[in-house]
Image: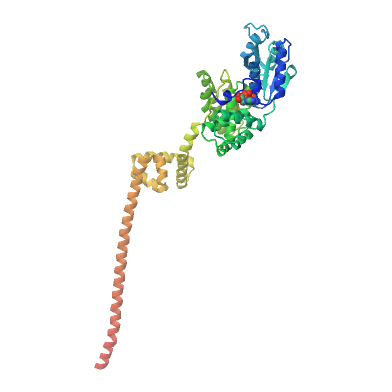
């Protein structure tokens, strides 16, 4: 069992904070037990502050059974009509007393759902059972007509100290070796959301690193945390309104988000038909994403967004009350692995484009041709590789290790031969040069000799004269 469920208070006295609200809830249900009809209560407040927990704890304290229903689910309306409308508190047909919880009523949109807020109002007017409705925002426009029929009670976010105290208790019970500084950091970060604080602590404990530094890396994951929150909303809710707003705070483009959803749908949904339906919506969303890029018309993102959030959310019949560890899309790991290769291919295309004076798009034809030539005629391929100045690692990325090595061998062999020829020529030239200088010297010597010999001759001449 995950810690959220393990440490969910069973009794109101264990619920942290909200003292006045607890008091009011007790009085309210005691009035019911006395047979006095009361208005249903609408509990509203930020996520993870204890709305659902308090409703369950109250039922448990007073020995009521809970019927939890999704307010916007069509089936809910008929169930509520059957059970809520007819069975009074004291004379239930099952001999039981029921507390009805209508979850997330701010997610109902008046028009789309056959049930709608109007239906809820009709039902709660007739109901003889105590009903608690929950919402994040009681003043959502869709709830305007509901407010006069319910008692509105606000739950404030929990304070850092309250959250810290809960974390300390859990740390003690779980025998965690964690210091107060770390716990305080988690508490502060949660901004009043006890659920996320408990989740963070459990995540750290699972990673076996409860250091302050590890807690800080949780904070670094903020961007992803937004995605995790959005995923939780989309995959847990069955309400159009709530799901379609899920991406509001997510700072990612839909083509990235769709991968996150696709990765995690099979982890959350348990029925094969639900998974199939969800993927059908995802594929339709993907079609709009493609269209947005092709037509350079990003207003298509809107349709993709609705399909991938509300479509996926409504693909399931029920909200799964379980902890699902969502994960990073595998496809991104795969893409980043092949990303380097794709970058290299781009470089080659650019080189070919420059040499052949064409676009990189056109160069793809040449690249394909080069691949075929590499198999059929390695000598020619070697010529082309040299001409395009494709480097070794680039060629390996293009042709694979084996084929590239063969061509590289040819190029190296040629280089060696070229060098040999060059050297031979150089030696030859050197020799010739030496020969020339030798002959020049010889000539010079000869002249010198002649010069020296001439005056001798002259003197002799003179002598003979
Ligand atoms: N006041 C509280 N006292 C003790 N534990 C709490 C309190 N509030 C929340 N928790 C813990 O956080 C978990 C989530 O709380 P809960 O489901 O009641 O939130 P919620 O307000 O209904 O949120 P949401 O609107 O997101 O459904 C509970 O299982 C419990 O472990």
Q: Position of residue 38 (x, y in %)?
A: 73, 14
Q: Tell me where residue 229 sits by quadrant.
A: top right
What is the quadrant of the C terminus in the image? bottom left
Q: Residue furthest right?
A: 148
Drawn side of residue 60 relative to residue 35, left or right? left
Q: Position of residue 266 (x, y in %)?
A: 51, 24
Q: Is residue 367 left or right of residue 281?
A: left
| Residue 265: % across, % down | 53, 25
Tell me which colouring the rendered structure shows. rainbow
Determine the residue positioned at 45% across, 41% down.
345
Q: Is residue 213 above or below residue 238?
A: below
The quarter of the picture where residue 373 lies is: top left
Task: Identify the image quadrant of residue 313.
Answer: top right
Q: Is 287 in front, or is 250?
A: 250
Which residue is found at the position 29% from the left and 65% from the top? 431
Depth check, front residue: 330 or 183: 183
Q: Residue shown at 63%/11% (left/top)?
A: 79
> In the displayed structure, would residue 51 be above or below residue 388?
above
| Rendering quadrant holding ligand 1 | top right
- Residue 405 visible to the viewer: yes
């Amino acid at each position: 069992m995950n810690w959220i469920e393990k440490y969910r208070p069973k009794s109101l006295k264990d619920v942290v904070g909200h003292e006045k609200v607890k008091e009011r809830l007790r009085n309210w249900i005691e009035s019911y037990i006395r047979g006095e009809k009361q208005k249903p209560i609408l509990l509203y407040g930020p996520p993870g502050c204890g709305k659902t927990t308090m409703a369950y704890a109250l039922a448990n304290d007073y020995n009521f059974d809970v019927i939890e229903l999704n307010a916007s689910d069509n089936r809910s309306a008929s169930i509520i009509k059957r059970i809520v409308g007819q069975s009074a508190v004291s004379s239930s047909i099952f001999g039981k007393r029921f507390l009805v919880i209508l979850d997330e009523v701010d997610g109902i949109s008046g028009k789309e759902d056959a049930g709608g807020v109007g239906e809820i109002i009709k039902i709660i007017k007739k109901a003889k059972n105590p009903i608690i409705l929950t919402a994040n925002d009681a003043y959502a426009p869709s709830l305007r007509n509901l407010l006069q029929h319910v008692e509105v009670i606000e739950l404030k976010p929990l304070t850092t100290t309250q959250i810290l105290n809960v974390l300390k208790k859990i740390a003690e019970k779980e025998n965690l070796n964690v210091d107060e500084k770390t716990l305080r950091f988690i508490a502060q970060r949660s901004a009043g959301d006890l659920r996320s604080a408990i989740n963070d602590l459990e995540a750290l404990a699972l990673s076996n690193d409860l250091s302050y530094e590890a807690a800080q890396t949780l904070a670094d994951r903020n961007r992803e945390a937004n995605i995790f929150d959005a995923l939780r909303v989309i995959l847990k809710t069955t309400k159009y309104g709530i799901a379609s707003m899920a991406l509001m705070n997510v700072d990612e483009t839909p083509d990235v988000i769709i991968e996150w959803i696709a990765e995690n749908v099979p982890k959350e949904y348990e029925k094969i038909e639900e998974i199939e339906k969800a993927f059908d919506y995802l594929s339709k969303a993907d079609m709009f994403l493609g269209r947005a890029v092709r037509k350079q018309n990003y207003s298509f993102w809107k349709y993709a967004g609705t399909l991938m959030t509300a479509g996926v959310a409504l693909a399931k019949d029920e909200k799964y009350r379980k902890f699902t560890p969502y994960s990073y899309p595998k496809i991104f790991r795969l893409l980043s692995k092949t990303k380097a290769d794709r970058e290299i291919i781009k470089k080659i295309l650019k080189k070919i484009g420059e040499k052949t004076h064409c676009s990189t798009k056109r160069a793809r034809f040449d690249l394909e041709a080069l691949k075929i030539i590499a198999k059929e005629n390695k000598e020619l391929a070697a010529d082309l590789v040299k001409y395009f100045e494709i480097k070794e690692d680039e060629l390996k990325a293009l042709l694979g290790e084996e084929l590239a090595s063969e061509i590289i061998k040819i190029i190296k062999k040629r280089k060696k031969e070229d060098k040999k020829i060059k050297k031979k020529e150089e030696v030859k030239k050197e020799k010739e040069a030496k020969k020339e200088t030798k002959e020049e010297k010889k000539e010079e010597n000869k002249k010198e000799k002649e010069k020296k010999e001439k005056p001798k001759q002259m003197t002799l001449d003179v002598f003979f004269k």
